[in-house]
Image (cartoon, coloured by chain):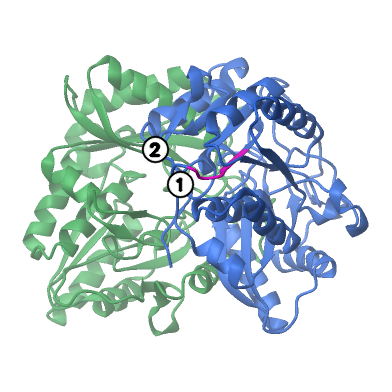
Chain colours: A green, B blue
Amino acid sequence: MKKIINTPEAFSTETVEGILLAHPDRLKALNNDLQIVVRNDEVKKGKVSVVTGGGSGHLPVFLGYVGQGMLDGCAVGNVFASPSANKMYTMIKGCDNGAGVLCLYGNYGGDNMNFEMACELADMDDIKAAQIRVSDDVASAPLENKHKRRAVAGLVYAWKIAGAAADKMLPLEDVIAVTNHGLDNLRSMGVALTPCIVPMAGKPTFSIGEDEMEVGMGIHGEPGIEVRKKMTAKETVTVLLDKITADMPLKKNDEVAIMVNGLGGTPLEELYICYKEAYEYLNHIGVTVYKPYIGEFATSMEMAGMSLSVLKLDNTLKEMLDYKASTPFFTNENK
Amino acid sequence: MKKIINTPEAFSTETVEGILLAHPDRLKALNNDLQIVVRNDEVKKGKVSVVTGGGSGHLPVFLGYVGQGMLDGCAVGNVFASPSANKMYTMIKGCDNGAGVLCLYGNYGGDNMNFEMACELADMDDIKAAQIRVSDDVASAPLENKHKRRAVAGLVYAWKIAGAAADKMLPLEDVIAVTNHGLDNLRSMGVALTPCIVPMAGKPTFSIGEDEMEVGMGIHGEPGIEVRKKMTAKETVTVLLDKITADMPLKKNDEVAIMVNGLGGTPLEELYICYKEAYEYLNHIGVTVYKPYIGEFATSMEMAGMSLSVLKLDNTLKEMLDYKASTPFFTNENK
């Protein structure tokens, strides 16, 4: 296991410590609990809160997106392990401004169960806590079982949309409606070239041949649809966009935002080569890229690989994307 | 060789194509030459130009820093290979606003020779073209031979400082003076855990044991000072900061900017753990971190490793760091 860390046991908490030391004006640990990170800037009174949670090992997911116009707080567990329901509940309670809390998180067993319990606890405190599960990965289940799909990098779009709606002071029902509208128009899929190593386990999450890539791999190393011989950037992007557009048809003159996400170990050069291929694929069918996002947005530590997320846009979604956001890892100015 | 690319031959140019497609409002290829990238936004009349150049494979270096408050243009060669003197000359000429051009680049043989020739050619056109070579890597030569040292991630600070001075409309002599002042107060050093693969070569740049790290490694895989058994994050940071502070002493109440730079394959989690250690090391000797920069700023494709760059600050350098910059990969607002 080749990592620059102190001990596997301290990996998650020391990561959070480093982030808090780097961004003291933006983030704080609620009750000094390094598994609960919330905004440290001023939050608008009466604003709906948008929160999330899950295992660590995915930076900038989750902590990196806590800030104005995106998330108000998150609960973070150990690597690839859900934080407890109690941590989530404490985080929800700490973030509530009286207007309700939207728990917006990836569709994973542990997180589902724990957020369910946390929301029940919040409910007993008369906190309106709603839940939306993100399930953008088209490779993980067929369309008719969309509720079974996993979340991948599309999470970041979900938070951007919900966070903007909340910052515009929309009531909880409207934040939920806009977010669901966004998720209806969002699809992702990725490939992995190498596994990652969970520090406490000390060995790779899966094995794959030197000339192979796993198509449809999940963000924790969940198996994909198939193992293929290594493909070119053009072939890879075509496989992913064929599958995405079969699931969510795009037609001439549609506008999309596209995210070319590196899983942690893939050089930025390769992501830009993939973007060129994605741009040309979309251009060929008459679809315009309104906004590209290229970089590492949701990772699996040192895993090499890439995912594409496509968000089909209308005026509402453009407005949410363009809305001001200011977090440690993601900022954009009003357009 | 596990990369998501089309062909090794097209690696560098397709990377640039992707970047230009993603940032058409910010960047353009001069004369449609994909090895010469310049600003596509409006450049202030009469401003000194700051330009650079070198081999590709280091994103966000170089193209990512072309924009307001940083670089006006760059010439980019193939992976780890200097662009030709002629490309550099064309780029210098294309960027000149009449106030002179500062060529600010890393101290490498090929780049030195080619920029030397390019500046001679520019001189024949009556363009004032000055050169400063960045040599921030303390591991690459002793202090008395500072001019022999290589450049590593400190390049980014150099461009930030020079770019701010130029954008403030200082004349060429003053831009040079401020930049040299910055470089006098800048030191870097790194470690590598794995090699990278140059696409055209198809094999790793060096070999290293599974339990070893190379201390003082250059950004192209140049040998470091020593190969050590794997160290913890605390030990690694201590080795680097001991060496940096022996070269550039820091005393109580000094303020620094510190960059924790990932070489491409190192997860962000590890960089934040290293930042925590660096913060504590500096805090222990009474030194304050004015501004941390944590992420991938200067890479070697998929190489795993980390470098630290320390910039000792005074009011002038703080002003330059805080000055507005807006490029595809680096922005900051005026403080």
Is residue A175 something one can see in this rendering? yes
- Residues at marks 1 and 2, CA–CA distance in whole angstroms: 8 Å
Q: Residue at x 72, y 41 (%)?
A: B131
Marks 1 & 2, CB-CB < 8 Å contact: yes
Of residue A66 and residue B117, the one placed in the foreground of this image is B117
Q: Residue B204 appears at what percent x and percent y? A: 75, 31
Is residue A81 something one can see in this rendering? no
Q: Identify the secondary structure beneath mark 2.
A: loop
Q: Residue B160 appears at what percent x and percent y? A: 57, 53
Residue A8 circle label = none
In which chain is the residue bearing label 1? B
The local crowd at label 2, few if under 14, some if 14 to 19, many if 20 or more residues have their Cα within 10 Å, is: some
Res A91 quadrant in image:
bottom left
Q: Residue at x 23, y 63 (%)?
A: A103
Q: Are marks 1 and 2 on the same chain?
A: yes
Q: Please, is residue B12 above or below residue A161 in the view?
A: above
For label 2, the residue is B41
Q: Please, is residue B249 above or below residue A309 in the view?
A: below
The question of residue A254 being in magenta is answered with: no
For label 1, the residue is B68
Q: Residue A114 appears at what percent x and percent y? A: 30, 66
Please report the bounds of the magenta region as a residue range: B46-51
Image quadrant holding the N terminus of chain B, namely top right
The local crowd at label 1, few if under 14, some if 14 to 19, many if 20 or more residues have their Cα within 10 Å, is: many
The earlier-in-sequence mark between 1 and 2 is: 2
Answer left or right for A115 relative to B270: left
Res B106 quadrant in image:
top right
Q: Please, is residue A287 above or below residue A175 in the view?
A: above
